[in-house]
Amino acid sequence: QYVVKYKMFHPDVKLFVDCHNDFYNKPVNTLIKKFDAWMIRRRAKTLIPYAIKFWGTLPWRVEYLQKVYKVPAEKTDLLIMGADENKIINREIAIIRREIRSCYNIPENSFVVISGGKLDKRKQQNLLMEVIKQFAEENVWLIIFGEPTKEMMPIFEGYMNCSNIVQTGWIPSEKAYDFFLASDLAFFPGSHSVFWEQAVACSLPIVVKHWKGIEHINVNGNAIFLDEVNVDTISQTIKELHNTTKYREMQAKAKSVASQFFLREIAKKGIGE
């Protein structure tokens, strides 16, 4: 009601609403959850006459807005999450790569896979570690940043002595940019993370688990979606991309789409320019 009142007294102000809820993180499969959705739908309804657009930050969040909160389709659109381009452009990437790799004793000519973020059971980085440890002789390395949950800690500790796996632990969020810039391939075998979009903005080819409604990171072939995520499919994908023509093609495509995920471009759309 405060937003509506403010808008009524300031008609020149543009009102946009964004939505981070979806069928995965905000399911409506119980009575209490349906009631919660109904309450939010009531609030959204009061904003519909005044809002220019309701933004879903993932494609399936746009669908969620329409199906669960009953926002008219013409009032909804996709506004992707992205990355701060100031942490990417005009930076000495060669120096960053050399410093990061040197810090963790990774040979400069290594093929480095990067993953990280919230390290819980749903992210499935344990599968990635199990695969990468088998590629030590091929000079394939894995960097994982983030702090494992209590449940996952014993599993991560089991890979602490792997010669080609680096576990950095917690890092400041802005430091993730340096790790992406120092790597060759982003790999996220579990549920969605905001780091998907950051990796794409850093010009990295990316491999992710396929989720219906989260295909937006694949703009022109810069991404691979895995319908089945297990040791075999991960291993096969690494083999297909380890210093191959297919990888170099993905790399070129990734570089061509990175700027679409810069915050400056997203902001222009967000304010209606």
Image: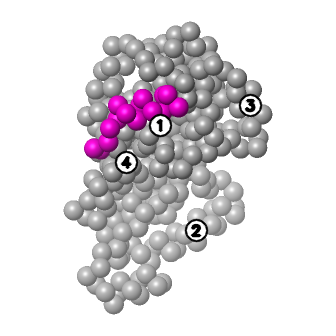
Secondary element type, mark 4 = helix
Assess whether mark 1 and mark 4 are in contact (beta carbons under 8 angstroms). no
Residue 116: where, in percent of width, then height? 56, 38
Q: Nearer the viewer, mark 3 or mark 2?
A: 3
- Label 4 sits on residue: 87
Which comes sooner in the sequence, label 1 or label 3? 3
**Disc 4 and disc 3: Cα gap in Å?**
31 Å
Which comes sooner in the sequence, label 2 or label 4? 2
Badge 4 amino acid: Lys
Which comes sooner in the sequence, label 3 or label 2? 2
- Which quadrant of the view contains residue 156? top right
How packed mark 3 is, by other alpha carbons closer than 10 Å (few <14, some 14-19, many 20 or more), is few
**Disc 3 and disc 2: Cα gap in Å?**
44 Å
Q: Which residues are magenta?
A: 89-103
- Label 1 sits on residue: 179
Check the picture and name the quadrant holding the C terminus: bottom left
Secondary element type, mark 3 = helix
**Disc 1 and disc 2: Cα gap in Å?**
42 Å
Residue positioned most to the bottom: 9
**Disc 2 and disc 4: Cα gap in Å?**
40 Å
Secondary element type, mark 2 = helix
Q: Is residue 219 left or right of residue 150?
A: left
Residue 38 — which label?
A: 2
Badge 3 amino acid: Glu
Residue 63: where, in percent of width, then height? 44, 52
Q: Main secondary structure of the magenta part?
A: helix
Which comes sooner in the sequence, label 4 or label 1? 4
Residue visible at 25% across and 82% down?
Answer: 12
- Label 3 sits on residue: 157
Residue positioned most to the left: 273
